[in-house]
Image (spheres, rainbow, N blue to C red):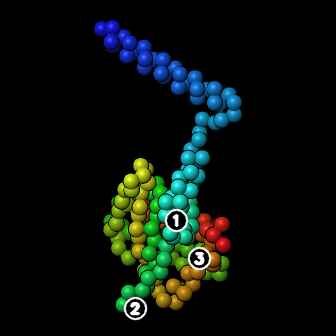
C-alpha cells in the first residue's frame, strides 16, 4: 500500500514538474511547438546520413533523391523519398516536375509499392520509379527544375529545389 502511494506521488510530482518546465520555457520565449526545429534537424540528418548522393529537392519533412536510368531502350526516372512519408498503395503515384521552361507529368512504373522503415525512428524510405520518354529525359537537368510534386493516394508532397542551384 505504501509503495502504491509512493508511486502515485512520484507520478504527480513528475507530471507537475514537466508542466512547470514547459510553462517556464514558454515564459522565457521558447514556444511549446518545437516541431519546426525538429523537422530542420531531421532534414539535415537525412542529408548528412546519405552524404554520397546529392538530393534533388526538399520538402518540410522529406528529402527527394532521383536519377535517370535506361533499360532496354526504356527510360525511368528513379526516385527515393527519405523522411516521414510513409505509404502502402496499389494505385500508383504521379510526379509533376515544374522546370524553368517545361512541365512534365509522370506516372509510376508500378502501381503497387510501399515505404520501408529505417533504423531511425520515424524515418521511412520510399522507392518509386516513373516512366519517362527519351525526349523528356533530356530535360531533367537538376539545375533546370524548380519544383517537384509527388501525389500518391490522398498525399501530396511539394519538393522545392531552392538552394540546389
Q: Report the Cα–Cα distance between label 3 and label 2.
A: 22 Å
Please tell me whether residue 164 is drawn above or below residue 140 in the rendered image: above
Q: Within the image, what quadrant is residue 69 found in?
A: bottom left
Residue at x-position 37% and y-position 56% = 117
Which residue bears the numbered disc 1? 51
Residue 142: mark in rendering: 3
Please tell me whether residue 104 is drawn above or below residue 35 in the rendered image: below
Q: Secondary structure at mark 1?
A: loop
Residue 113: mark in rendering: none
Q: Earlier in the sequence, mark 1 or mark 2?
A: 1
Which residue bears the numbered disc 2? 73
Please tell me whether residue 135 is drawn above or below residue 56 in the rendered image: below
Please tell me whether residue 158 is drawn above or below residue 35 in the rendered image: below
Q: Secondary structure at mark 3?
A: helix
Q: Is residue 39 left or right of residue 8?
A: right
Q: Is residue 35 left or right of residue 78?
A: right
Query: In the image as oriented, which residue stretches furthest toward the left?
Result: 1
Q: Report the Cα–Cα distance between label 3 and label 1.
A: 17 Å
Mark 3, residues whose alpha carbon is within 10 Å: few (<14), some, or many (≥20)? some
Q: Earlier in the sequence, mark 3 or mark 2?
A: 2
In the rendering, at what x and y percent does residue 87 appear? 39, 59
Amino acid at each position: 500500500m505504501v509503495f502504491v502511494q509512493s508511486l502515485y506521488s512520484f507520478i504527480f510530482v513528475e507530471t507537475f514538474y514537466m508542466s512547470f518546465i514547459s510553462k517556464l520555457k514558454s515564459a522565457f520565449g521558447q514556444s511549446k511547438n518545437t516541431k519546426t526545429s525538429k523537422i530542420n534537424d531531421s532534414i539535415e540528418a537525412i542529408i548528412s546520413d546519405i552524404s554520397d548522393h546529392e538530393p534533388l529537392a526538399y520538402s518540410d519533412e522529406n528529402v527527394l533523391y532521383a536519377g535517370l536510368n535506361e533499360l532496354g531502350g526504356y527510360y525511368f526516372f528513379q526516385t527515393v523519398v527519405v523522411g516521414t512519408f510513409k505509404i502502402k498503395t496499389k494505385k500508383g503515384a504521379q510526379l509533376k516536375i515544374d522546370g524553368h521552361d517545361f512541365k512534365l507529368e509522370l506516372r509510376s512504373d508500378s502501381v503497387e509499392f510501399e515505404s520501408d522503415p529505417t533504423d531511425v525512428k520515424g524515418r521511412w524510405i520510399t522507392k518509386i520509379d516513373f516512366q519517362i520518354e527519351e525526349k523528356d529525359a533530356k530535360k531533367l537537368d537538376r539545375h533546370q527544375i524548380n519544383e517537384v510534386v509527388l501525389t500518391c493516394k490522398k498525399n501530396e508532397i511539394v519538393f522545392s529545389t531552392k538552394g540546389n542551384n
